[in-house]
Structures are given as structure tokens and as C-alpha cells.
Image (cartoon, rainbow, N blue to C red):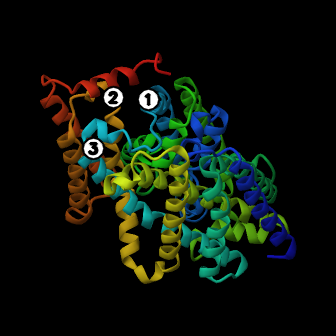
């Protein structure tokens, strides 16, 4: 990298800090900090929901999949999330917005105390926070690796620099800062992606190469399904993406919870889905074309980085790195903000009475402290990632596999058809998903499709069966009233 590249990255850092300062004035209490006061415009929420799905993994791990297997990446990744967003617009997104209006919730797990009881809420909240602690730590480590690969910065320096930049806006501006940062980084990502798209297309013969590269690549690279990414894998990933995109990944639920109305939440989901329909085709094109420009590279996960370094001039390399950096910090900061809401609203009040009945300003001070503490802990894990060795990788693989089962009682609990599901159904479905994961991963050594499908299918089956078994039993009045309100636009 050259001086101009560092200048571009420095300017982006200043932009992020400026966003934090601007957002600070909009945050008067914890409601503003966690759910933007329920005033998120649908266009801002939609863009934020979309870009929150990207991180350094896209430019490293998914680049390797594109290099080795081709177009199937778009089919199972973007295609699944498009379906998830449409389902979200029809079913889940409006209910999250109505839930905030009905109960004044500020965290995605807050309603679980009413729905299943405090004990079940605590199990789900604690498990989610602990898993996210390592998940976010691993993302910080990936940022350090990206910065080291481009700039030569030591991993620890890169991780701490990223954390300090993020702290400058997320602890003062909360969700508003996160939303504005997402909006800014979307345009940075689009600019960087278009530059690389045009550059690669020019080296391959012009715009027509978008269609002709498939004739020059291995024949299976143009197929809808290739390698381990089979139709069975697609079915499983659609189910997981539906759970994750609509609230199983808590920070994505916050975009719907903060919508001013059910109709606005629907538009948020539909805009996010529309962006997934179009933008990955541009973003992934250089990754698909990489085997023609960089044949037989030893590590396909480095293909995107190598393309940038080899084909882009000074200044534009910094722009692409800024977009990759922005995507990952956006996700880590978004996770941190939502985890802070769960800790502040759902865990600490149960642990100690002094955290109950706080006013908005007191709750805001606590929110900023928990945000700082959680981010500091994840930075330490990111710095010490190598010492965790296989343990960190194991935890992350479990997080990816189990996010579906853990999401089932949270999302299905919003639906009237499952109104008879109680705490036993919630815990039973999670345990069934755990058991299914262990069996197919360690007992059967099953193919990738089954490892994705079985855990969430087991969870849905058990949750549905236990709700059906109790279908003739009376539903608690509070739950019945909640179900009625969540199904009507009269609430929002």
C-alpha cells in the first residue's frame, strides 16, 4: 500500500468518528441507544439490515468458495437471504415492530420473559451473549488479519485500532451511529466493488465478459449447485437464513424493532432483499473471474486480496480495504450494541434489584458501560485468538450450526399458531437442535447439507409437536393478548 491508500483509510476513520459525534445528539436515553427511539426510516433500516450481513468472511471465505465452486455461491447465500427477507416482510418484521409498540421493548430477548417465563429467557439470553462473545472476538481477529495482509500492521495493533475506531462511535451514538455508519459504508462498498468489477471486466474483454467468463471457467462453475453445495444444503440454508435474518441474529431484529410501524418494517425487509438480489452479482463477479486472472493459486481465500493488490492503482486499494474494514466493523459494532441491550435490559435486572426500574438516562449510562465492557472483552479474545486454537474454531462452528435451533422459540413464539408452546417447548426444541447437531456432526459425519438441515429441522419438529400436544390447553391471558396484538396492524 502507498501513501494515498493510507490517506483514504484515514479519511474513512474520520468519517466514522464524525458519525459518532453527529449521532450523540440524537441519543437522550436507552430507547434511542438501543432501538433509535422507534424512528428508523425504512430506507435506512433496509440498507443497514443488508450491509449487516457482510463481514471480512465474504472477502476471504466466500471468495474461496467462488474461486473453487463458482456461481453456486450466489444461489445458496444471496438466494437464501432473499427468500428470508420476503418471508420476514410477510411474517416476522411487522411483528417485531408491533412488539416494541405494545411492550416498549428495547432488546430482542426482552419479550421472552412474558412469553416463556424468566428462567427460559435467561437461558436464551446468557447462551446468546456467551456465544456472541467468541463470535465477535473471531471477527476482530479477521479484521487484524485483513489489515496485516494489506498494510503489514501487527495483528494486535490492527485489532486495537479497529476497536478504538468502533468505540468512538458505538458507545456514544448507539444504534443511530451504527445505522449511519452502515449507510456510509454501503456507499464505500459500492464504490469499491464497482471499481474492481470494471477493472476485472476490462482485463477480460469488456462488459461482455460478465456472460462469457463461464465458457472459459470449468464447466461446473456455472451450475446452480456444485460440490458440497447441493439442493439439500440450499433447503437447510434457507431455513437457517430465515431464522437468522429475521431475528435469530439479534442485531438484525433491532432494525425491525426500531421501525416506526409494521408497514415500515415490511419495507425494511423488502429493501434488504432487493439489495441482496442485485448487489452480490456485482460484488462476486471478480471472485468468480479470479481463476482466469490468478490460476492455480495456493490459497483461494486470498484471491480477492490478490486481485485488489495486483489490478488496482494506489488510492483504490485503500478504498477497497476501507470497504472490507467497514463491513466487518459494522457487523461487530451492531452485534455489540444489541448484546448490550440484552445485558442491560434482560440479564442485569435479574441479577440485581439495583438495575431495575431505571429511568431512561440511568439506563443510558448503564448501556454505554455494558457496551464498553463487552467490546473490551471481545477485543481481548480477538487478540488472543491463536491461544484459543481449536477451541475458538469449535465455538464458532457451533454458533453457526446452532443459531437456527436457538432462533426457533424466539421467532415462532411470535406466531399465533404456536400460542400454546410454553417454556418446555422452547427448551425442548433447543435441546433437540443441539442433539441433532451432535449426531450428524460427530456421530454420522454426514454431508454438509445434512449438518445444516438436521439441527434446525429437529428444533422446528419438536417445537411444533409440543405446541400441538398442548393445543387444547388454555393459554395464559397475557400471552393470548400478546398474540392478538402482534397479528393486527391496529397495534402499529
Q: Name the residue under label 3.
A: 457
x and y percentages locating residue 343 in the rendered image: 42, 55
Task: Identify the mark at residue 95; answer none if there is no mark.
Answer: 1
| Residue 417 point in image, percent of width and height | 28, 25
N-terminal label among 2 and 1: 1
| Identity of the residue furthest to the top in this view | 490
Q: Residues within 10 Å of mark 2 (few under 14, many from 20)?
A: some
Pair 1/3: label in front: 1
Give the SS element for disc 2: loop
Q: Are marks 2 and 1 in contact (CB under 8 Å)?
A: yes
Q: In this image, 332 relative to 417: left or right?
A: right
**Residue 116 occupies quadrant:** top left
Distance from the alpha carbon under mark 2 to that under mark 1: 9 Å
Viewer-nearest residue: 143 or 446: 143
Q: What element carries label 1?
A: helix
Q: In which quarter of the image is residue 196?
A: bottom right
Question: Whole-Å distance between the Cαs marked 3 and 2?
Answer: 18 Å
Q: Looking at the image, is mark 3 or mark 2 earlier in the sequence?
A: 2
Q: Where is residue 191 in the image (x, y as percent from the top left)?
A: 78, 52
In the picture of the structure, the residue carrying the numbered disc 2 is 415
Mark 3 is surrounded, within 10 Å at the Cα level, by few (under 14), some (14 to 19) or many (20 or more) other residues, namely: many
In the drawing, does residue 373 fall left or right of residue 274? left
Residue displayed at 61% across by 58% down: 171
Residue at (43%, 31%) from the top-left corner? 99
Q: Distance between the residues labelled 1 and 3?
A: 23 Å
Percent across and percent down for residue 325 are 66, 63
Q: In which quarter of the image is the N terminus?
A: bottom right
Who comes first in sequence, dot 1 or dot 3? 1
Q: Which of marks 3 and 2 is in front?
A: 2
Q: Can residue 454 be seen in this view?
A: yes
Amino acid at each position: 500500500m502507498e501513501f494515498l491508500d493510507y490517506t483514504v483509510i484515514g479519511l474513512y476513520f474520520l468519517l466514522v468518528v464524525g458519525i459518532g459525534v453527529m449521532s450523540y445528539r440524537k441519543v437522550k436515553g436507552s430507547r434511542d441507544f438501543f432501538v433509535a427511539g422507534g424512528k428508523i426510516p425504512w430506507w435506512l433500516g433496509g440498507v443497514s439490515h443488508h450491509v449487516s450481513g457482510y463481514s471480512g468472511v465474504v472477502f476471504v471465505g466466500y471468495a474461496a468458495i467462488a474461486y473453487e465452486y463458482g456461481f453456486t455461491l450466489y444461489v445458496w447465500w444471496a438466494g437464501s437471504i432473499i427468500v428470508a427477507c420476503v418471508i420476514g416482510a410477510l411474517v416476522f418484521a411487522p411483528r417485531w415492530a408491533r412488539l416494541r409498540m405494545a411492550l416498549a421493548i428495547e432488546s430482542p430477548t426482552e419479550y421472552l420473559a412474558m412469553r416463556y417465563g424468566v428462567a427460559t429467557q435467561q437461558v436464551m439470553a446468557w447462551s446468546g451473549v456467551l456465544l456472541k462473545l467468541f463470535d465477535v472476538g473471531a471477527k476482530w481477529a479477521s479484521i487484524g488479519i485483513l489489515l496485516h495482509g494489506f498494510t503489514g500492521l501487527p495483528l494486535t495493533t490492527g485489532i486495537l485500532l479497529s476497536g478504538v475506531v468502533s468505540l468512538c462511535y458505538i458507545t456514544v451514538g448507539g444504534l443511530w451511529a451504527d445505522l449511519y455508519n452502515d449507510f456510509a459504508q454501503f456507499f464505500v462498498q459500492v464504490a469499491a466493488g464497482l471499481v474492481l468489477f470494471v477493472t476485472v471486466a476490462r482485463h477480460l474483454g469488456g462488459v461482455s465478459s460478465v456472460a462469457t467468463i463461464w465458457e472459459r471457467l470449468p464447466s461446473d462453475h456455472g451450475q446452480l449447485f456444485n460440490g458440497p453445495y447441493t439442493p439439500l444444503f440450499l433447503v437447510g440454508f434457507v431455513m437457517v437464513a430465515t431464522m437468522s435474518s429475521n431475528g435469530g441474529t439479534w442485531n438484525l431484529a433491532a432494525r425491525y424493532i426500531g421501525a416506526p410501524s409494521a408497514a415500515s418494517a415490511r419495507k425494511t425487509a423488502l429493501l434488504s432483499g432487493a439489495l441482496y438480489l442485485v448487489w452480490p452479482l456485482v460484488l462476486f463477479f471478480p471472485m468468480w473471474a479470479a481463476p482466469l486472472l490468478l490460476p492455480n493459486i495456493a490459497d483461494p481465500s486470498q484471491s480477492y486480496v490478490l486481485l485488489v493488490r495486483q489490478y488496482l492503482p494506489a488510492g483504490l486499494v485503500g478504498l477497497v480495504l476501507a470497504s472490507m474494514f467497514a463491513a466487518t466493523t459494522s457487523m461487530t459494532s451492531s452485534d455489540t450494541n444489541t448484546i448490550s441491550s440484552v445485558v442491560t435490559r434482560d440479564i442485569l435486572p435479574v441479577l440485581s434489584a439495583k438495575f431495575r426500574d431505571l429511568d431512561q438516562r440511568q439506563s443510558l449510562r448503564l448501556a454505554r458501560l455494558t457496551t464498553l465492557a463487552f467490546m473490551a472483552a471481545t477485543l481481548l479474545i480477538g487478540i488472543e485468538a491463536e491461544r484459543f486454537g481449536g477451541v475458538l474454531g469449535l465455538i464458532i462452528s457451533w454458533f453457526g450450526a446452532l443459531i437456527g435451533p436457538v432462533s426457533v422459540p424466539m421467532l415462532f413464539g411470535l406466531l399465533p399458531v404456536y400460542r400454546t408452546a410454553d417454556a418446555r417447548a422452547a427448551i425442548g426444541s433447543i435441546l433437540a437442535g443441539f442433539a441433532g447437531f451432535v449426531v450428524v456432526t460427530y456421530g454420522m459425519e454426514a454431508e454438509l447439507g445434512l449438518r445444516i438441515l438436521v439441527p434446525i429441522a429437529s428444533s422446528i419438529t419438536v417445537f411444533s409437536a409440543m405446541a400441538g400436544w398442548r393445543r387444547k390447553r388454555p393459554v395464559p391471558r397475557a400471552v393470548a393478548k400478546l398474540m392478538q396484538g402482534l397479528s393486527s396492524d391496529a397495534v402499529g
